[in-house]
Image (tube, rainbow, N blue to C red):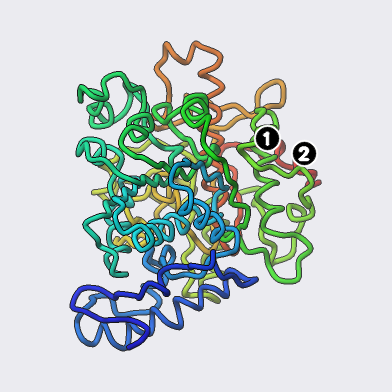
Amino acid sequence: ADYAKISKNTVEFNQDEVINRTGGNSVNEYYGRENVASQVVLPLWETTLFPKGWVTTPTLDELRTRELVKYSPIKILTDEQGALISEILHDHDKNYVINGDAGTGKTVLLTHLAASALNNRPDARIGVVVQPNWEKTGSAIFKVYGMNSSRLSVLTSTKLITSQERYDIIIVDESHKMSRKYGKQHPSFNAVYNIPEFSDCSSHLEILQRLGKQVILMYDVLQVIRPANVTREMFQSLTANYERKFLTTQFRIKAPEGKAYTSDDYINGIKYLLYKDTGLLDSTLTNFNPDFNRGLFRDSSPNAYFGYFTEQPLHNLIEWLDEDMNFNPEHINRILAGLAEDWRQSDGKDPSIKHWYEGDIARRWNSTQENWINSKDADAQDQIGSVFAVQGIDLNKVGVLIGNDLQVDTYGRLVGNPDNFYNTNGTFTAEEMDIKENRFEFTLFVLNIYYVLLTRGIDGIRLGFWHNDAFQDYMEKALEIK
């Protein structure tokens, strides 16, 4: 009873459980910290809440895969995360950009920061800006943990802007995906500029800065994937006076025990592979360390974190993931791919429509973008996941099909090929593509998509080359694999 008050609709944790007042307790191993959820939250759920009919999800395994546990605002923080929250809460007049690679805990930091602000600033109005496919999840997380306060709004940037409400704190998840004024996107994103007060603005970020006294932005320059996203130059200009911080602890990727390499070696190796000729690795935005252990990419042992198949990519990736499921049935494994096969969003309603063919194998794209990992489709595990379905998602083992939308030019550099790229809103107009700078930006969109796909796996990743043997040769040379 001292731990939590249980009511009809919420689990309400007391202030000391929700908030790390000392700046964040930490332990050495992130995966051990998951025990906080499995040993406290989930048993409470199974033994008390579900039998009483207060929740509808009965099983520990099902909850384990859900954002409720992953983003829980009662999880223990690292010193790095806790110190950031303490600094932000004690300096109301300073704005922040929190830079972090994929898997460094930006969204966990966001839930803790919002929870801390609710409890430490009782008069503050707090706006949490999320992507459309996370709006319901974000609201549910705060509600379940007893923080569904009238002072807290969890909305998309479009909804927050159109409400024209003012906030003491605005916290933005995935701020690299915020929209700018641009024609090729859903009309609702541009409709905000019809509001007279914001007609002179060029991006959603610029408007949010007018609506919030303090703005905190979670940002990763390597996850921008559309022309309509706020550009690097716009972002840098709008945040020139912001305090910049880096999250450096890698939570998602787990190097196998007994190896000489680490998860950071993998992240830095993937950055080098994709971006070594772009100039971005010299930027302070990407936190790149060139001294990564290349041995990770040469490890050919069965339990190696990284590997690749040189033929029958779809067949071999399926076989590899199925074998893992035989030993680890609780794993959530998926094959992901670049946007190298044609698709229509309406295809998701018809399971007979296939997009990927290899011999007698036929697979389709993900049927939905929202909460795809928990899809109830009969063929859900067989679907090929796109970047839109997996940004921000953790998977156990991942197969990635590298398509011919990413090619090697005559100078030995990676370039995006729009002729093999199937996403209407992911390319510039034909006229814009005549501009050299825009062709470079398009290449970055394609590279960023593969960066997202290649950083989803907790326990391992394997590559397959989809009509793209040239990339295999490029990779082997770049990472000195052979």
Residue 431 visible, this angle: yes
Quarter in which the N terminus is drawn: bottom left
Residue 290 in picture, x, y percent from top left: 76, 42
> What residue do we see at 79% from left, 63% from top?
260
Mark 2 residue element: helix
Residue 328 in picture, x, y percent from top left: 53, 75
Residue marked by disc 1: 281
Foreground residue among 464 and 91: 91
Give the answer, above or below, for where 357 lies relative to 53. above
Residue 130 in picture, x, y percent from top left: 35, 47
> What residue do we see at 23% from left, 75% from top?
56
Residue 424 visible, this angle: no
> What residue do we see at 42% from left, 21% from top?
428
Q: Amino acid at mark 1?
A: Leu
Foreground residue among 402 and 185: 185
Q: Within 10 Å of the Cα at label 1, are there few (<14), some (14-19), or many (20+) other Cα atoms?
A: some
- Labels in figure, total: 2
Of tags 2 and 1, which is closer to the observer? 1
Foreground residue among 269 and 237: 237
Give the answer, above or below, for where 427 lies relative to 105. above
Give the answer, above or below, for where 392 lies relative to 66. above
Foreground residue among 64 and 473: 64
Query: Mark 1 and mark 2 in contact (Cβ < 8 Å)?
Result: no
Residue 329 in picture, x, y percent from top left: 48, 75
Residue marked by disc 2: 477
